[in-house]
Amino acid sequence: MIDSFDPAELLRPDLRELVPYEAPVHPGAVKLDANENPYDLPATVREEIASLLRDDPFNRYPDPLAIELRQELAAYTGLPAECIMAGNGADELIQNLMLAFGGGGRVVIATPTFSMYRIHAVIAGAMPVSAPRRTDFSLDPEVVIAAAGHPATRLVFLCSPNNPTGNVTPPAEAAAILANTRALVVVDEAYLEFGGESCLPLLEGYPNLVMLRTMSKAFGLAGLRVGYLLGSPAVVRQLLRIKQPFNLNRFSQLAARAALAHRAEFEALIRRIRENRQALYDGLNAVPGVTAFPSEANFILFRTPLPAGDVYHGLLAGGVLIRNMHGPGLQNCLRVTVGREDENRLFLEKLKLILGG
Ligand SMILES: *Cc1c(COP(=O)(O)O)cnc(C)c1O
C-alpha cells in the first residue's frame, strides 16, 4: 500500500499546458463544426465496401505499408507509390513529422491555422514558432522565411486552403519559401478538392516539400481516419523509421480503396458543396454586421459584431453547432462548415435571429 500517488508529478513538465482534446457532443443539433462532408457515401461505394468486407481476414494484421491503398492514391495523385505514405488520419502524419524531424528543434507555423500543428510540436518536444499571417490572412513569405532562418528550424507548416481562414497560398509563394530554407516545408492540402491550386508540381524542384492530404473531408471518411503524405521517397523513408507498424487498420484501408476506385462519384457531391459555399457566403455577408471571409474550402470563417461566444451559444440553443474560433488574430470569429442546403438555411435563419437582421 502507498498513501498517495500523483501521476501529474511524473508528467513531462513541458506537457502540463496541454489539455485533452474535446469535441462537443450535442445530439440532434445540425453539425457544422468539424468540416465533415454532409453527404452520405455514394451507394455504389457502400456496396463495394460491403463486398470487400465479406471475405477480408480480420484475424490478420493489416498491410503495414498499405500497398494497395497507396497504388490507388498513386493513380489519384499521379505520383509513384514510393512518394506516398498512408496515415491514421493526416493527424498521425503531422505527429510523425514532428517526432521524426521536429523534436528538440523549432517548428515554424503560419498562424492563425489548424491547432494540431502546435499541439503535436509540443508533444514531440519541439518549439512551435508563430509566423503571423497578414490581417487578410494571406501569407507573408518574407515573414515565414525570416522565422525559418533560425538554424534550429526543422519544419515549416503552411496550410492551403488554410483552416480556419479558407484562403489559399499560391504555389509561387510556397516556392519562394522552399527556395529559401533548409527546413522541410509541409503544405497541408486537406481541403484541396474544394479549391485552390496544389503545390504538387513543385515537388520535382524542391525535395524539401511534403504535402498532407486526407480522405476525411472531400471523400467523407472522417470516421475511418485515413490521411496520406506526398513527398520525395527520401523523406518517406525517414518517416518510415518511426511509423507505427500497423497504423492503418484493415477496414480503413479497404474502405479508402473503394472510395478512390469510385472517385468520379464524389465529384458531383464536391461540386454541390462548392455551390452551397457560394450561397452560404452570400447569405452570411447579407446578415447585418457580419463579415464573411472568402473561402476555397468547405467552411467559411466570419466575424460578428457580437462576442463570438454569445453567437456560438445562441446558435446552439437554436440547434446549430458551429465552431467558435475567437482568439489571437481571430477576434469574434466563428467557423461554419458548408452543410446541406437545408442545414445552411437553418443556420442563416438562426444567425439572423441572434444578430437582429
Ligand atoms: C481536418 C484536417 C486535417 C485532419 O485530417 P484527418 O485525416 O481527419 O486527421 C488535417 N489538416 C487540416 C488543416 C484539417 O483541417
Image (cartoon, helix red, strand yellow):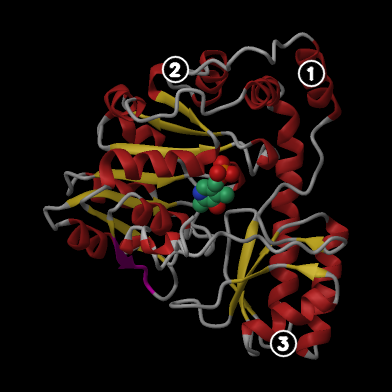
Residue type of the residue flagged with mark 2: Ala
Q: Residue furthest left?
A: 151
Instruction: Please name the residue that numbered disc 2 is placed on.
Output: 81
Question: Horizontal and vertical percent for residue 34?
Answer: 66, 56
Numbered range of the magenta stretch: 128-134
Does 38 appear above or below 341?
above
Instruction: Please name the residue that numbered disc 1 is placed on.
Output: 48
Question: Horizontal and vertical percent for residue 273?
Answer: 73, 50
Specify whether residue 131 is painted magenta: yes
Residue type of the residue flagged with mark 3: Pro
Q: CA distance from mark 1 to mark 3?
A: 47 Å
Quadrant location of residue 73? top right
Of label 1 and label 3, which has the lower sequence position? 1
Instruction: Please name the residue that numbered disc 3 is placed on.
Output: 288
Query: Which secondary structure type mostly characterizes the magenta part of the structure?
Result: strand
Question: Horizontal and vertical percent for residue 6?
Answer: 44, 63
Residue type of the residue flagged with mark 1: Glu
Of label 3 and label 2, which has the lower sequence position? 2
Residue at the location (77% across, 16% down)? 53
* Label 1: element kind: helix
